[in-house]
Amino acid sequence: LLITYLFGSNINEANRWLTIPVINQAFQPSDLAKLALIAALAAMLARRQNNITDFKSTFLPIIIAIGIICALIGLANMSTAILLLSTCLLIMFIGRVPLKYLMIVVMVGVLGLTSAIFLGQRGETFKSRIQDFVESSTDETKIPFQAEQSYIAIATGGISGKGPGNSEQRNSLPHPYSDFIYAIIIEEYGMIGGVSVLFLYLALLYRGMRIVANSNKAFGGLLSAGLSFALVIQALVNMAVAVGLGPITGLPLPLLSMGGTSLVFTGISLGIILSVSRGDHQDEMQTGSAMNRPKLKTA
């Protein structure tokens, strides 16, 4: 992440990408760091369930890892850093971390993200987006161009939409294939399509939580929870931005937005979640077979 910040490819006024020399493809290390931190946090919490309240041996390594990764990501991508911090808090809550420690994480996170706003490459952009959102809530003339075009797309979509491929706002809406794809979905498929997409993500969250509830291993359950939360929260934030419930973030819509690195790591996350579910199912089958196995009679 530090190498990316210092020497990465500058796209949209931020060094978020590293170019792979041989294939000449851009790679976003923050997606890998996000997946790695969630897995590491799940592993640390799983190993320390017996002494989860110990500050020095349990909580201190966790907060150091979260602080470093989120701060480095926040230097160039504030929205991803906030999303990752929120996901880590949810994992720690499920992992039975005491509330007072969670409050410490929140304070450290706020301090780190505030520093990233003033020191990072996108600090001014982040502050201007927050300011635009606050001002536009009371003055319609100050609605940003992207948000305005998104609202038009949603308003003209109606109940059933204009039909696949018949979007008109995609020609004027910036990034209609990534940041604001949800607005285009509503324009083409209407509120029916928009609500259907929302329920699909909620169904994904439900299935992820079912895996957590049925998991026999702490690591698998925490890992599944973290990855499920990361995907669904990102989706909800993207949809909230499109309909005007939040400031513009630049986060893609998982599985639907166009993107290379994001799509690859979304697929990896879903694969890990399914792997956890499969492992728990196999353990249940083996346990059931052992219980139903006829016992040898002793003479």
Image (spheres, helix red, strand yellow):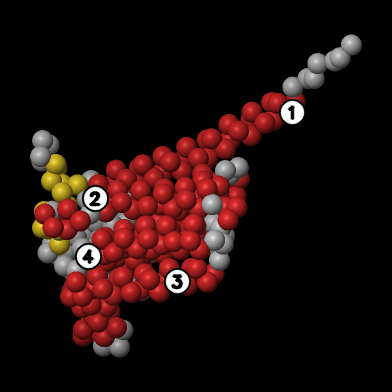
User: In the image, which disc is placed on residue 291?
Assistant: 1
Spatial separation of the CA atoms under disc 1 and disc 4? 54 Å
User: In this view of the protein, which residue sits in the foreground, 244 or 262?
Assistant: 262
| Residue at the spot 19% in from the left edge and 68% down from the top edge | 120
Q: Helix, strand or loop at disc 4?
A: loop
User: In the image, which disc is placed on residue 104?
Assistant: 3
Indicate the quadrant containing the N terminus: top left, top right, bottom left or bottom right: bottom left
Q: Decide which of tag 4 and tag 2 comes sooner along the chain.
A: 2
Judging by the rendered image, the residue that carries numbered circle 2 is 29
**Do tag 1 and tag 4 residues touch (Cβ < 8 Å)?**
no
Q: Classify 10 Å Cα crowding around label 4: few (below 14), some (14-19), many (20 and above).
A: many
Q: Which amino acid, by three-letter code, is at mark 3? A: Ile
Instruction: List x then y, in percent, for residue 218.
Output: 55, 47
Q: Which of marks 1 and 4 is in front?
A: 4
Judging by the rendered image, the residue that carries numbered circle 4 is 75
Spatial separation of the CA atoms under disc 1 and disc 2? 47 Å
Spatial separation of the CA atoms under disc 3 and disc 1? 46 Å
Whether residue 86 is situated above or below residue 42 in the rendered picture: below
Q: Helix, strand or loop at disc 1?
A: helix
Q: Decide which of tag 3 and tag 1 comes sooner along the chain.
A: 3
Instruction: List x then y, in percent, for residue 252.
Output: 28, 57
Q: Classify 10 Å Cα crowding around label 2: few (below 14), some (14-19), many (20 and above).
A: some
